[in-house]
Amino acid sequence: MPQNYLTISISDMATMIYYVSDGNVVVAHNHDIGFKQLEADGLGIIAASKLLDGVMYTLEFISLHDRIPTEFYLATNRYTTWLAGVLQGASYAQFYTENKPVRVTLDTTKAPSINYARHKKTVFSFKV
């Protein structure tokens, strides 16, 4: 795993964005756009812009102190292809990236749980 990377975790109501440097979370941002808002905008240009607002906000904050990471880890359980395309296709021209493209790696081990009728999918254990 690289030393500096961005982790983006999307749930139904919010997106958590973490900047990790040398194994420590340096910046954490809770962006109030989640799957519900993205689906309401039809997973189109407006939805992509809303998602990228939170990512760009975090990257601007990071750029004040460090070079922005070009490794993004995406933790999601839906729309992985569309989300990865939005993140990789965005223009990061205002940031110095040493001419490296942004790479998005899917990290399904940290994907948020799926809600079913207001209940979270959980594992139950009991004795008989």
Image: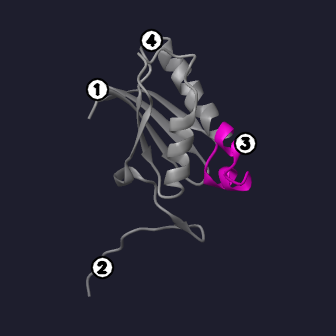
Which residue carries the number 4 mark? 65
| Label 1 Cα crowd, 10 Å radius (few <14 / some 14-19 / many 20+) | few
- Name the residue rendered at 53%, 38% in the picture: 87
- Name the residue rendered at 69%, 48% in the picture: 44
Which residue carries the number 2 mark? 126
Residue 94 spot, x, y in % from top left: 57, 16
| Residue that lies at the very extreme toward the bottom in this rendered image | 128
Q: Is residue 6 left or right of residue 50?
A: left
Please say if the residues under marks 1 and 3 sit with CB atoms less than 8 Å apart.
no
Q: Is residue 111 above or below residue 53?
A: below
Residue 54 spot, x, y in % from top left: 60, 33
Please say if the residues under marks 4 and 2 sit with CB atoms less than 8 Å apart.
no
- Name the residue rendered at 64%, 32% in the picture: 53
Q: Regarding mark 3 in the picture, which secondary structure is present there?
A: helix
Which residue carries the number 3 mark? 46
| Residue that lies at the very extreme toward the top in this rendered image | 64
Q: Amino acid at mark 3?
A: Ile
The numbered mark, 3 or 4, whose residue comes first in the sequence reads 3
Which stretch did the figure color magenta?
Answer: 33-49
Q: Is residue 57 above or below residue 122?
A: above
Prevailing secondary structure class for the magenta stretch in the rendered image: helix
Q: Is the C terminus in the top left, top right, bottom left or bottom right quadrant?
A: bottom left
Q: Is the N terminus in the top left, top right, bottom left or bottom right quadrant?
A: top left
Residue 120 spot, x, y in % from top left: 49, 65
